[in-house]
Amino acid sequence: MPGRVLLALRPRFLTHAVEQLPLGVVFVSGSNGKSTTTHMLVGILRAHGLSVFTNPSGANIPQGIASAMLADIPLNGRLREDVAVLEVDEGFGPRLAPQLAPHSVLLVNLQVDQLNRFHEPARVAGMLESFAAVADRHLVVNGDDHNLVALAARLAGRAAQSTFAVAPAVLQNGPAWLARGDNPALATPADRAAGATVVVESSSGLDAELTVLGESLAVRLPARGLHNAVDAAAATAMAAALLGDELDLDAVASGLAAMETVFGRGELISFRGEDLELIMMKNPPSLQVNLDYLDRPEQVFVAVDEGTPDPSWIYSTDLSRIDHVDVVSGTKAWQLATRFGYGDIEVGLVEPALKPALARFLALPKPARGMKTLVVNYEQMMLIRKELGYLEIEGTASAVAPR
Amino acid sequence: MSIVLVHLYPRELGINGDIGNVMALRKRAEWRGLPLEVHDHEVGGELPASAHLVHIGSGPVSGQEAVRADLERITTTLRAWSSAGVPFLAIAGGWQLLGEEFVGLDGATLSGPGILPSRATLTTGRRVGEVVAESQLGEIAGFENHGATIDLLGDAQPFARVTYREGHGPADEGVIVGHRVGTNLHGPLLPMNPAWADWFLDAAAELAGVSPATPAPALAIVDERAAKSRAAIRGRLGA
């Protein structure tokens, strides 16, 4: 990876790259939705005529950010854009902040995520706090997330603070993971932040209604769902903080509308003329949101391996959108199959080895309705992509072979 | 008459999927023809008049703080149930709360309800990984992820003897007194180790005065999958 080598050779590369940006550096972090929120904020700022440097989704640790900058940067080693808006991993934020000196930080939420890595949400709150403390201009947090509201209170007096929130009536009808409040992340009415800059008033399909500084604004989302409306509110709140009087609501709407529409929740892969949908099993809230989109898919493949050291949390996931699983794979296959058994979800085949499992699943006829659906953790997704690539090449080869 | 299963603080103490223990008890009771009701006890709520089984899951320190005052409020009832032989299953953070003493990271000692004869001392270090252990009912497997050392008090017996875990030697795991068990094992414990699920159910059924019917075929299916889950963990630990 070039970023890693670069940082080893030139430890001040990141600092040098950003230190002369006229409008400085903005961090976007949190458990879920930071990629989407970053894209939205970038879209809104660009619609206001700014040139923005950003990192691609998931390239949110030092090496990834360095690689992304390397691809963009001129010979003097300094970014040419007006401002850098960076998605930052919670765990690496504390290391990145001293190098990149973000003047503004946007925290989207703090949810249960990767307990084997982060241990517990309170520890993640500490990580977020350590780099949010670096901001001296704007700190924007989710006003419905009591951990983040408390974090902002502890940092009072540093940066100017503002929040975004969901109207209480909408929150009540929201998806389970949002309404449930993870352990218990959702603020009670008493400790919700008052006076949010941006409020989600309604969300229906791709349309959402926001109130931005008291003015109503209809926006079109890149994907369905309240969580996307919340991400749009987060991005708008940070744009309002950064732009002040220059904020133009039409530009907010056009910046959001310019984003490519995403229909599924997962990644679509075309394989031998058939679309496959890959859904990532990242953490409880994100998996729940993804599953809530499914409507009893006809063909389901699930694969989980050591990339998810303890899949126990799958017991707290509502799996009612799935009524059967055709093939379960990965080193944790039997644990998942046990979970499905207790959920009255029928299981066809349990085959821990990926290759034969995938072959069996792909051999199923094309479903009459929808797509073949694969619910997998990150590591299995990578292996599956690779495997599909091989199979596609083999398939092509056999298609052109003499009859 | 039904078995009444009280689940303490499912909202605050439930980030490791320990709700799976309650799911396993509920489904196995159904498959074994044992009537069972689950009573979720939330902060500020009322406990039922009687209980035949109590479960408390694990949670972060913030979750423990959120329930501590309520736990104190219901301590007398929990102690009465415990003296009457009601089985308890307490996982990690929940076990820390139900012990005699709880020593926080600041060194301050809080007294607990003493349902389990143990003292928990929070540590900054953490033990995370798969575990295989030998228990009264045979080999069990699970996943530990906790930041506390636990001392058993008096002549309390460990729940199991760890035989394999990554990077650490054999050690005692958990505590067992009568039908009360404290353990650090997730997996969750009962779905993956169904012999213990049935042990709890049998004790609860006796208290409630209900008897099982002919087992449903689903039991054998999940039990085989659970056995293969344990075998996979054993294999990964090189056992």
Image: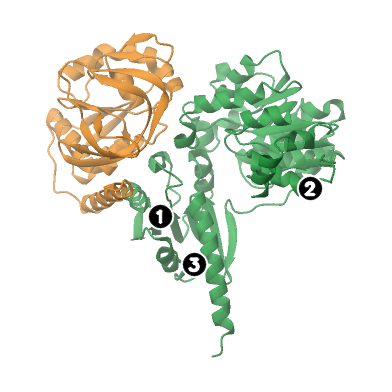
Residue at 76% from the left image edge and 32% from the top image edge: A25
- In this figure, which residue is indicated by the disc labeled 2? A72
Residue A371 falls left or right of residue B66: right
Q: Is residue A188 visible?
A: yes
Residue at 38% from the left image edge and 40% from the top image edge: A312
The Cα–Cα distance between marks 2 and 1, rounded to whole angstroms, is 38 Å
Query: Given the image, on which type of amino acid does mark 1 rest?
Result: Gly
Q: Is residue B47 visible?
A: no
Mark in the foreground, 2 or 1: 2
Percent position of residue A177, x then y: 51, 36
Earlier along the polypeptide chain: callout 2 or callout 1? Answer: 2
Q: Report the number of numbered marks.
A: 3
What hue does chain B carry in this figure? orange
Furthest toward the bottom, the residue is: A403
Which chain letter matches label 1? A
What hue does chain A carry in this figure? green
Mark in the foreground, 3 or 2: 2
- In this figure, which residue is indicated by the disc labeled 3? A367
Which chain letter matches label 3? A
Residue A61 falls left or right of residue B239: right
| Vertical order, A382 against A243 (above or below) | below
The Cα–Cα distance between marks 3 and 1, rounded to whole angstroms, is 23 Å
Residue A330's label in the rendered image is 1
Quick one: SS at disc 1? loop
Look at the numbered discs 2 and 1 and tell me whether their residues touch, using CB distance below 8 Å.
no
Look at the numbered discs 3 and 1 and tell me whether their residues touch, using CB distance below 8 Å.
no
